[in-house]
Structure formats: C-alpha cells, structure tokens
Amino acid sequence: MNKFFNYTDVKELIPKKPLTANKYDFGNILLIGGEPGFDGAIMLSAESALKSGAGIINIFSLSGNVQNILEKRPEYMVLSKVDDLKRLLNKKITIIAGPGTTNYARLNEILEIILDDRTNLILDAACIEIVKSKKFSSLPIITPHEGEAAKLLEINVEEISNKREYYAQKISDKFSVITVLKGYETVITDGNKIYICKDGDSSLAFAGSGDILAGLIGSFLAQGAKRIDSCLLGVSLHAYSATNSKLKRGLTANELIDLIRKNLNQ
C-alpha cells in the first residue's frame, strides 16, 4: 500500500462477518479508564467499539460509577473491583487502557495486572506512559496527540509539529510500539513503514474525538484485523466520517459515532 492512504484504500480490510458468527467471534473488549469527572470519555470509547461491531464490551470504571453507566448502556458489563478484572483477564481479550485518565501514577496497581503479552493492547491518554517502563514482545498500539508525543520524548511540542513523521517513527523505534500520532494527516508507523491518512480536517477538533478513535481501533483489533490494519481502518474511517458529515463546526461525539456506523455499513 502507498504511504498516503484514505478510507477507500483500506475499506477492504474490514473484518468479514460470517452468517453463522456469534458474539465471541467479534471480540471481547475491556476498557479501563474513566477517572471521576471523566466517565464520558470511556463511555465514548465503549460506544465507538460497540457501534463498529465489537461483540462484548467490558468497562473497568475508575470512578466506580457502575449504576450510571448501566442506566445509559445495559449492554455493557461494568466492573469496579480488581478481583473481577483478574477473572476477566483469563479470557482472550483486547484491552483499551486510558480513555478518561489524567494520572498514570494512580493506575499502577491495575496496570500491573493487565500487562500481559498475550493480550491485544491499545494505550491512550495517561496510559501511554506505560511504554516508558515496560517492554512488550507483541507491539502495543499507542495513540498520542502531539503534546503526549513530546512528553514521551521529552522535547518541545513545536519539534513534533515540524517533523511529525520523523518523531512518530522515533517513538516506535524507542519504545517498540505502533504509533498513531493524531492530528491533521495522522501518522501511523510500526517503526518500519509509515502511513499518512489523507482523510480528515478540523471538524474532528472536539472533546472526545480521540476517545472515539481508541475505541474504533480496538474494535477492529478485537474483530480479528491485524494491528496495523486496525490502525489504518480506525484512523481513516474516523476521519472520513467527520469530513463527509459536511459539518465544519459543531460536530458532536455521538453524531460522529453514528456516522461511523453508517459508513461502516455502506
């Protein structure tokens, strides 16, 4: 595939849905996050995963606000105890860690439990910091914006902005990860190949956009797509859906999720 791509180029990578499939065939996802005051972020990630076809959605809520989540979405399995989390991790699972987190230090106990090379792992927000202290045999996916990328490399944000491809690749090389450097013309790299998404514009500049993307990438990964393919699909469908909404201003997170589902089914 060419370095530059859009949704049309990668649409064929969408995992097929056999007539006889059941929910287990489409992935078991665990989302960890949602600190007090940030429940909405993990809900958006979960909604994105659900409406893009993931089979089972589990949420480990750091706020402990189980009842509120279940009232809004009875489809989710919501956990609040570490022992429940341990039992869940005995199963084949895709983990999205980080939506709705701001403080990596508070997550240490939980992260020690989930750091298992057998799982598919997407790291977002504060959980991106895991890669500084842990090496994985199978590449986790991280989804930093430029500020988070600068923090990882301990450089100024302006340096990232001026050389996005170079620094995305440097992050992947240094930390052995697949990097999705968010922003205009999102960069995806495993440290070897580099891909740049030509879909997308500033209509994606709203709170919750990144949470939706993390859920979307995790959904495709759980459904059986390869790691890089999950990133290519998630990034381009996310961007394509926003651009083709024709809303340059005022697009909301829930509207985008519904557009993603619509475009995924066309």
Image (cartoon, grey):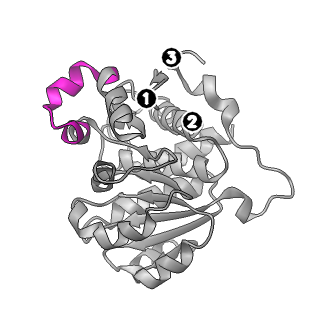
Q: CA distance from mark 3 to mark 1?
A: 13 Å
N-terminal of the two: label 3 or label 1? 3
Which residue is rendered at x = 37% and y = 32% of the image? Answer: 173
Horizontal side of residue 22 vs 70, given as left or right: right
User: Of circles 2 and 1, which is in front?
Assistant: 1
Whether residue 168 can be seen here: yes
Residue under circle 2? 233
Q: CA distance from mark 3 to mark 2?
A: 14 Å
Residue type beneath disc 1:
Gly
Magenta span covers which residues? 149-165
Whether residue 181 can be seen here: no
The picture places residue 125, in percent across and down from the top left corner, at 30, 52
Residue type beneath disc 2:
Leu
Residue type beneath disc 3:
Lys
Instruction: Please give the label number shown on residue 3.
Output: 3
> How busy is the neighbourhood of tag 2: few (under 14 within 10 Å), some, or many (20 plus)?
many
User: Of circles 3 and 2, which is in front?
Assistant: 3
> How busy is the neighbourhood of tag 1: few (under 14 within 10 Å), some, or many (20 plus)?
some
The quadrant the N terminus occupies is top right
Q: Is residue 113 above or below residue 54?
A: below
Which residue is rendered at x = 47% and y = 72% of the image? Answer: 72
Horizontal side of residue 21 vs 139, given as left or right: right
Q: Main secondary structure of the magenta part?
A: helix
- Report the front residue among 19 and 207: 19
Q: Is residue 177 above or below residue 125?
A: above
Magenta stretch holds residue 12? no
Which residue is rendered at x = 49% and y = 61% of the image? Answer: 116
The picture places residue 34, in percent across and down from the top left corner, at 33, 66
Q: Secondary structure at mark 1?
A: loop
Residue under circle 1? 191
Which residue is rendered at x = 83% and y = 50% of the image? Answer: 18
